[in-house]
Image (tube, rainbow, N blue to C red):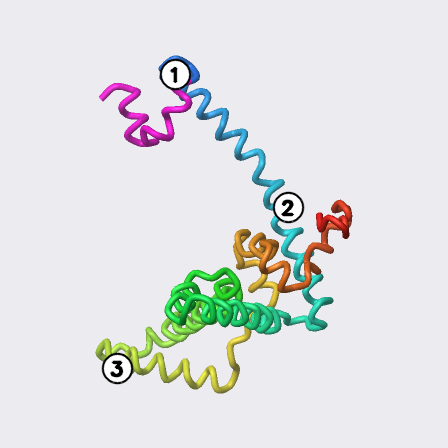
Amino acid sequence: MDKKSTLENYLSVPRLKPYLKVCNEDVNKGLEFYQLNMRLGASFFPLLSLLEVSLRNAIDKRLIDYFGKYYWWNDLQTVLKKKSNEKLMLLEKKYGEKLSKDYKNKELLNSTADKLKSQYNSLKREEKRSIRIEIKTLHRTEAEYKAMNDLEKLRFIEKKLEERLKIQSIFIPKSRLIASMNFGFWTSLFQNEIAKALNNSILEIFSHRPKRNKKSGK
């Protein structure tokens, strides 16, 4: 297998094609351009990381002020669900119930409202898995535990987990939840219908944004 075929095999033809095109199919130059582009892309990661951290913290502070609560996500969910239901009711009146149900499965307001709750539950499941591993590690060397079959061991661990959760329930710190939400979630809050549901208050984090023209709405 020649060098070009090897590169196409690992990098794929569509990915490599633009680099070969600009250097008249010269494989060595194409690879050099590819490596330069990788280094250029990598140089942006610190800036993008800083942007993501700064943006989510600014949004967090703004929503604390807007809802008047440190833990604001339940209120955000309520607002977005309410706005979504209003839209669905209008659709039902205009097009019928079936369309509104189909629309609900894809609808931005609903999906965004559920993401924080879904992530919070996911983090709780991760924490439960960690506790299970901790319990198993604690008891795995005991003769009584070793004598159990797989089903008995599973029941034993689940019983210990239940006892643990009765004493101390799982708590996910806000900082952990905020940090675990991806960049796509935070940017989705600026989409038109979500921003409108929040009375465009989220835009106030950009203190140097152009002033809106009240007459033109721009």
Task: Mark 1 and mark 3 in contact? Answer it, CB < 8 Å.
Answer: no
Residue 188 drawn at (x, y percent): 56, 55
Q: Residue at x 59, y 43 (%)?
A: 48
The residue carrying pointer 2 sits among few (fewer than 14), some (14 to 19) or many (20 or more) residues within 10 Å by Cα, namely: few
Disc 3 target residue? 152
The residue carrying pointer 3 sits among few (fewer than 14), some (14 to 19) or many (20 or more) residues within 10 Å by Cα, namely: few
Q: CA distance from mark 1 to mark 3?
A: 61 Å
Disc 2 target residue? 50
Disc 3 on helix, strand or loop?
A: helix
Q: Residue at x 28, y 25 (%)?
A: 6
Q: Which sits in the foreground, 166 or 3?
A: 3
Residue 26 drawn at (x, y percent): 37, 14
Disc 1 target residue? 28
Query: For residue 145, what is the image quadrant?
Result: bottom left
Disc 3 marks a residue whose amino acid type is Glu
Query: For residue 133, what is the image quadrant?
Result: bottom left
Q: Residue at x 40, y 71 (%)?
A: 97
Disc 2 marks a residue whose amino acid type is Leu
Residue 23 drawn at (x, y percent): 42, 14
**Which residue range is magenta in the image?**
1-21
Looking at the rendered image, the disc whose residue lies closer to the viewer, 2 or 3, is: 2
